[in-house]
């Protein structure tokens, strides 16, 4: 028995102009949709994350309490559960998997909610990292139907520095000739190890390492952390899936569509949701300055910087204090 | 005619226990040693830099005025001019080039100054990045002979985060099978491009990219900057040389020797030089917090943070305002 459900989206014409035939959107729900369909929370997945990885923010007594809310967790295309390079048949398999945008993802998620659940109004859209990019896109596309928005360590548009950082990660992975332009049969293990090690300096802050906080995650040394955490994480993943998600992330922009025609500030200004934007003080790829810019251009957004040394990982629930702060922000948003 | 001189250091027993036979220390001098030998400034090279790369801080009217000071610029072992994987004969060539520490470098530099110039007292030791690591090591090893110290965007010890960042760079370069464990005949071009792209996000700040300041360096787009600047820079370099320097950098620690036996704070406390430590506010791998820690443990050091968006590159003279600030700090130090 599967731990998730799948929405058969049929043939989806992507922004890039390619049709993703037989698109599959995998999702998991928590709780029950109430009779008046007014309790749906959307909580999309992050880079390389899967529906199960979002459960750190869901639970009885927490803001996202499944006794009260119907929480839908859609999987990003490319994450290996929804349609991805690793699970799509020829001719769109592996290196031929088409470029999917955040906008493409969100349009299919929208169809899931309307066609399967008959819901077009969200109590809340919430996400961490690429999850936040999706939540932002929802709020910008249907301003009067998204009541609340929480963006954790994410952005409404990939910044130039964030783009460059990701491009370095892509370069590290694809430097392995075993990648074969995406047509590998065996995983490019050297490249997967390289991207893991190259990501390690970005994911957590200088202070995290200075204080040897990997020990709190039960790794004895830096090298232990690099091998058993970082390499372990990436070697479980499919290289083409990672590259597909990196492309999606690099091209994230809530204004890159026919409605906003690239006008980023107009797209931000259109958002009606009551919003809290929560960057982490020490996040190296979603620094608070980018969030501050977004908040300045939104109608009713609060900037609430998490003062943590966990860098980007701060949003992932591993740090108890940050987790409490995020849960508190959710409770504040959901209070009225 | 060569633009530099070479000190034949003979057989040098390194900290790792291997003898670097026929060690060559390449150096360049500016100005003239005065009769009482009281005007020598030491200005070692940075990661992958060569003696010519230090000339941005040397010139008439600048603090480091060759009419007044005798400025000696020694090349780091591994930089391709001093003994390096690329220029050392078998059996210590290429992948077999031994691990050289900052301490090893500085001991040979010391011999250059005493044996060739008869000088053991320095007016000033100054360096940027790995150059600062060498300057710190000088000040810690001969406290009563180094009068002044300026450390620009560098550290007295490689921090754990800095180590991890460098390890990611190493992984990106060596992911290219053409590297062949160091025994390549043709350069591993894919790996060199990968390290270049992976370094690009680290060398300059998020703000630098947010403001598109690569345009000030006359690159039209991010991709133009990545190819023509970053890839151009790294593809001129030898892969084994880069790896040798990364090892040296990762193991930098002024206390990793018989005198201080790993007691970092004692080594910092031993420094007598009048010191200015100049990190850049936005440096991603030598963040100001590490410099602040060092300053707190030194006798007469001032922390003077450069408020620039140029990140680590701030110390390299490309930003005119930062260059003026560094020159002013040198003038302040040299005033008495």
Image: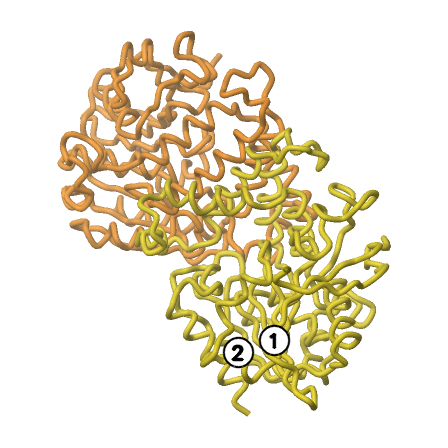
Chain colours: A yellow, B orange
Give the farthest residue toward the top: B90
Q: Is residue B335 above or below residue A150?
A: above
Which x, y percent locates residue B203?
Answer: 50, 45
- The answer to which quarter of the image holds residue B38 is top left
Letter of the chain that mark 1 sits on in the rendering: A
Q: As drawn, is A298 to the left or to the right of A143?
A: left
Which x, y percent locates residue A238?
Answer: 63, 44
The residue under the point 58% across, 30% down is: B191
Pointers 2 and 1 in contact (C-beta within 8 Å): yes
Q: Earlier in the sequence, mark 2 or mark 1?
A: 2
Which x, y percent locates residue B300?
Answer: 18, 50
Letter of the chain that mark 2 sits on in the rendering: A
- Return the residue at label 1: A71
- The answer to which quarter of the image holds residue B245 is top left
Q: Give whichever of A279, B130 is nearer the camera.
A: A279
| Image quadrant containing the N terminus of chain A | bottom right
- Return the residue at label 2: A64
Instruction: Report the disc number at residue A300.
Output: none
Q: CA distance from mark 2 to mark 1?
A: 8 Å
């Amino acid at each position: 028995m599967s731990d998730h459900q799948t929405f058969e989206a049929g043939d989806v014409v992507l922004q890039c102009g390619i049709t993703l035939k037989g698109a599959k959107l995998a999702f998991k729900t928590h709780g029950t949709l109430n009779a008046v369909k007014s309790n749906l929370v959307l909580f999309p997945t992050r880079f390389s994350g899967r529906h199960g990885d979002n459960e750190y923010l869901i639970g009885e007594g927490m803001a996202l309490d499944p006794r009260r809310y119907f929480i839908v967790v859609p999987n990003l295309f490319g994450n290996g559960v929804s349609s991805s390079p690793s699970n799509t048949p020829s001719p769109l398999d592996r290196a031929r998997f088409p470029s999917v945008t955040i906008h493409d993802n969100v349009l299919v998620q929208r169809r899931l909610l309307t066609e399967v659940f008959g819901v077009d109004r969200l109590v809340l859209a919430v996400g961490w990292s690429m999850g936040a990019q999706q939540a932002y896109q929802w709020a910008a596309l249907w301003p009067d139907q998204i009541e609340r928005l929480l963006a954790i360590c994410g952005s409404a548009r990939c910044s130039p520095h964030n783009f460059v950082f990701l491009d370095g990660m892509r370069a590290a992975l694809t430097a392995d000739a075993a990648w074969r332009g995406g047509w590998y049969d065996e995983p490019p293990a050297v490249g997967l190890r390289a991207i893991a090690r190259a990501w390690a300096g970005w994911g957590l802050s200088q202070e995290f390492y200075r204080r040897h906080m990997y020990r709190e995650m039960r790794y004895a040394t830096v090298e232990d952390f690099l091998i058993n955490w970082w390499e372990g994480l990436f070697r479980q993943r499919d290289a083409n899936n990672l590259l597909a998600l990196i492309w999606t992330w690099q091209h994230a922009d809530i204004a890159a569509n026919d409605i906003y025609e690239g006008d980023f500030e107009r797209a931000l200004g259109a958002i009606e949701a009551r919003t809290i934007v929560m960057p982490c003080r020490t996040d190296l790829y979603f620094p608070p300055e980018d969030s501050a810019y977004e908040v300045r251009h939104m109608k009713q957004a609060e900037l609430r910087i998490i003062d943590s040394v966990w860098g980007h990982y701060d949003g992932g629930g591993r740090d108890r204090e940050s987790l409490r702060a995020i849960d508190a922000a959710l409770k504040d948003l959901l209070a009225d």
